[in-house]
Image (cartoon, rainbow, N blue to C red):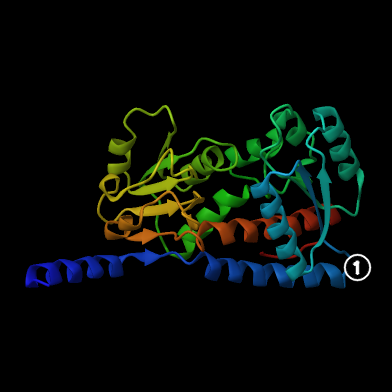
Amino acid sequence: MSIHRKTLILLESLNLALVTLMDGKLVAGEVIARVSRAVSILKAKGVEPCLATVLVGDDEASVTYVRNKLKACEQVGIKTINHHLPKEYTTEQLVEVIDILNEDRNVHGILVQLPLPKHVNEFIVTSMIKPNKDVDCLTPFNVGLLAYNIAKLTPCTPTGIVELLKYYNINMQGKNVVIINRSMLVGKPLSMMLLHMDATVSICHSKTTNLAEMCRDADVIVSAVGDRSKFTLTKDMVKDNAVVIDVGIDKVNGKIVGDASYDVREKASYLTPVPGGVGPMTVAMLLRNTVIACSLNEGIDIGMV
């Protein structure tokens, strides 16, 4: 091997070493520890926090997500009730299920696993959840509170991202942020939360014509596409020392990957790995929201979670 080639390899390894991988498992573990203490406080007062999940159909990814969420609840002592319903369920039938859960005083949080089958009206179904049981912050009421920065229950994935940014002391004031996602689960609520942190936020999507250019101008990129056949965030789209939050998840050649190609590490100062970055934070925030919802419904102060 030539000296020139050895030098290039050394420089590349040094560049990769400079990036800080944002450890979602570590930060989530600290959140979960606080949740466990809150669960103990609630149980000492005779209250058992309970999360009800609603899953329609047998979409493989959704089934896996719900299973993981139920397992995480079990590990911290949160009771769960899973309603796994046939894919033929109608909007009206789902609303009936939500009504029952709303009126059940032993249920403190309700999570409808999205996406729902195409024939179901997601807006109608999620809008029927009582706001103080809405652990995914999908009801119009809670979205409104989020816009005013006074929501007690905030969306899980965006909140997980914000918690990671705070943990790593990344000051968002004045930062140019590009979010590649416009969903109600990630892009839209995250844009509001980052605005409250005084960032300048742009939301991009499949119809954005100058995406690469906008990414190159961004101090922070949040990518949540989750389909490598449609989009990959490459290093030529990332400016030096940018922060890259990779929310996407896909499987390529049997390996779980995010939206960002591996060589993005050569440019980024901070990067969330996939897996092990945003994913664990999303689950941790769901657990936190469930105990917060429990405290709201039961009128019990559990302190900071």
Q: Position of residue 257 (x, y in %)?
A: 46, 55
Classify residue 184 by image quadrant: top right
Which one is nearer the viewer's eye here, 102 or 17? Answer: 17
Classify residue 15 by image quadrant: bottom left
Which one is nearer the viewer's eye here, 302 or 185? Answer: 185
Q: Position of residue 99 (x, y in %)?
A: 88, 38
Relative height, residue 143 to residue 19 (above, below): above
Q: Is residue 277 left or right of residue 77?
A: left
Residue 8 in view of the camera: yes
Q: Which residue is mark 1?
A: 46
Q: Quadrant of the N terminus?
A: bottom left
Relative height, residue 203 to residue 36 (above, below): above
Q: Quadrant of the C terminus?
A: bottom right
Relative height, residue 143 to residue 29 (above, below): above
Q: Is residue 43 left or right of residue 144?
A: right
Q: Position of residue 50 (x, y in %)?
A: 83, 58
Circle 1 Cα neighbour tier, 10 Å, few/some/many (<14 / 14–19 / ≥20) = few
Disc 1 marks which amino acid?
Answer: Gly
Q: Residue at x 53, y 59 (%)?
A: 163
| Residue furthest out toward the left | 3
Q: Position of residue 102 (x, y in %)?
A: 86, 43
Which one is nearer the viewer's eye here, 77 or 300? Answer: 77
Which one is nearer the viewer's eye here, 49 or 300? Answer: 49
- Label 1 sits on a secondary structure element that is loop
Q: Residue at x 49, y 50 (%)?
A: 247
